[in-house]
Amino acid sequence: MPELPEVETVRQGIMPHLLKRKVKKVLVREHRLRWPVERSLVQGMRGQVIKDITRRAKYLIFKTDKGHAIIHLGMSGSLRVLPSMAVPQKHDHVDFLLDNQLCLRFRDPRRFGCVLWTGDSPLNHPLLRELGPEPLGEAFNANYLFSVSRGKKVSIKSFLMNARIVSGIGNIYANEALFLSGIHPNRAAGRISLKRYIKLVTAIRHVLQEAIRQGGTTLRDFTNEQGEPGYFLQELRVYDRQDQSCESCGGVIKRVMIGQRATYYCGHCQR
DNA sequence: CCGGACGCCTGTCGGC
DNA sequence: TGCCGACAGGCGTCCG
């Protein structure tokens, strides 16, 4: 479900409720997530004060004096801030009970997400260590993309969705950024000019920033910490719009599969 | 090393 | 109405 803008929306939303709060207790109802919820998470977080919440790619990192909790929302995960007494629903797997009568509740029907604990530096965690640069950071630029793509036959769309190349871009925003920069999703990454990578980087930054500003994209079930949807859906130009007309040229938007993922594009505007 | 396919899960939707 | 397959904002792992 959530890509970088949705995760960032959640981070900004939960931050004011959690910062400087003590975690009185962690309640695990279901530990069988993508990676098992370890006892060390429950023990490590108990009694700790949340000093900061940061984001790396699609991971949220909760800093305490003893270590860091790392949360990934997978395809269907959500975090809500609720009164501690709120009755848990189906798929509400983990609660972080706070000292202000609130509770951070992790829900994930498909259980592709994870809730991890590390006593080490979180960026050293095996799942985070190999991540490519943040698309909104300075290390991500056209020269970087151009140089790491030389000789690569993979489609530009799969390339953008590869977290080792650039982290945080998922299916929606890969499709949208390629439309905005006029690049065909099937084009080999190694056969794109520096000039076009300049356009692509601008498009990626723009679409991610705009999506964050609108609180993310709610297609089916994404909500923020208060259970509210995001409003970027109305800005989508190609994603989930197959057979509809391209707002730029009036042509028909196509849908194909690239790397087992639905891919939407305008065959006239994107080459 | 590279690129592509496969699972991991549950829920929903469309077609018959 | 029910059943069945396709598909869904991700990503680690395996295979050729």
Image (tube, coloured by chain):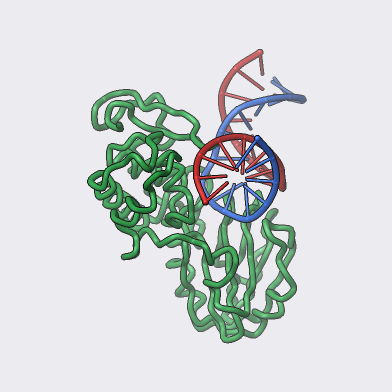
Chain colours: A green, B red, C blue
Q: Is residue A248 left or right of residue B1?
A: left
Q: Quadrant of residue A242?
A: top left
Query: Residue A141, position in %: x, y?
Result: 30, 57
Instruction: Count how many numbered circles sit on residues in the image.
Output: 0
Q: Nearer the viewer, residue B12 or C4?
A: C4
Residue at 53 percent across and 78 percent down: it is A63
Q: How far from the left and from the top, in percent, is residue A196?
A: 26, 44
Residue occupying image coordinates x 44% and y 46%: A159
**Residue at 45% over, 40% down:** A154
Residue A121 picture location, percent across and down: 55, 78
Would you place residue A154 above or below residue A76 in this image?
Answer: above
Of A151 and A257, which appears nearest the observer? Answer: A151
Please state which of residues A74 and A137 is positioned toward the viewer in this rendering: A137
Residue located at (64% from left, 79% from top): A45
Q: Which quadrant is the C terminus of chain A positioned in?
A: top left
Position of A32 compared to A107: left or right? Answer: right
Picture quadrant where residue A78 is located: bottom right
Coordinates of residue A149 in the picture (x, y in percent)? 38, 48
Q: Does residue A98 appear left or right of residue A161 in this picture?
A: right
Compared to residue A68, the image places residue B6 above or below, namely above
